[in-house]
Image (cartoon, helix red, strand yellow):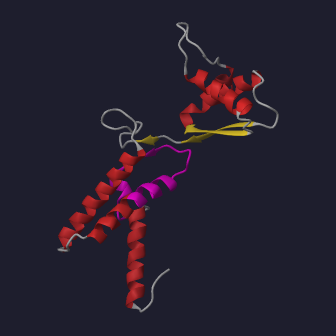
Amino acid sequence: AGPADSEAGLLVQKSDGGFLYATTDLAAVRHRLQVEKARRVLYVTDAGQSSHFQQVFEVARRAGWVPEGAELVHVPFGVVQGEDGKKFKTRSGDTVKLRDLLDEAVAHATEDMKSRFAADGRKWSEEAERTARLVGLAAVKYADLSMNRESNYRFSYRKMLSLTGNTAPYMLYAFARINGIYRKMGGEAA
């Protein structure tokens, strides 16, 4: 977003009378500041929307809707991309819902753990099922939180659930191993 972006016009209504995102965003700004009396409004969207919100905020200021001391803030975040580098979407082309993402991570962790149990000749149990769920959820949380908020990142279940590298499963595995060593020594890790 440079000077040219802020100079560009903001289309509020199409020639056929149709309204655009800018229309609803301006209405929301006005309502939040003038009706709800908000003094700080945060817009959390992907970084690609920065120029749009810069324009919306400027129009709101010029229209006199932003009282002195009120803040309009865009909080950008990076775009989650598939392994192909394109915006992460489902096979149908829709964006991925968090619930589906978490369910898939749990399924991947469960599949991985079941294959390890089978290879070791161990029996699958309810405790193993709970552990797989925790590992899958932790993998998504850690992968998301370990990234810079504003950076785009490529999403990969394989990398996220890896037992090596900077991943939640690796750290959980290391923690479990350390606890095992402490137990053998007669103590327990925190």
Magenta span includes 143: yes
Query: Who's the residue at 38% across and 56% down the image?
Result: 160
Query: Who's the residue at 77% across and 36% down the image?
Result: 70
Image quadrant where residue 81 sits: top left
Place of residue 149 in the rendered image (x, y in percent of width and height, measured from the top left): 55, 48
Image quadrant where residue 62 sits: top right
Place of residue 103 in the rendered image (x, y in percent of width and height, measured from the top left): 34, 51
Q: Which residues are magenta?
A: 137-164
Residue that extends furthest to the top in the rendered view of this protein: 16
Query: Who's the residue at 63% across and 30% down the image?
Result: 53
Magenta span includes 116: no
Place of residue 118 in the rendered image (x, y in percent of width and height, measured from the top left): 18, 68
Asked whether, in this view, residue 115 is left or right of residue 148, the answer is left
Residue that extends furthest to the right in the rendered view of this protein: 68
Residue that extends furthest to the bottom in the rendered view of this protein: 186
Residue 170 at least partly seen: yes
Quadrant of image for the N terminus: top right
Above or below 46: residue 22: above
Above or below 110: residue 123: below
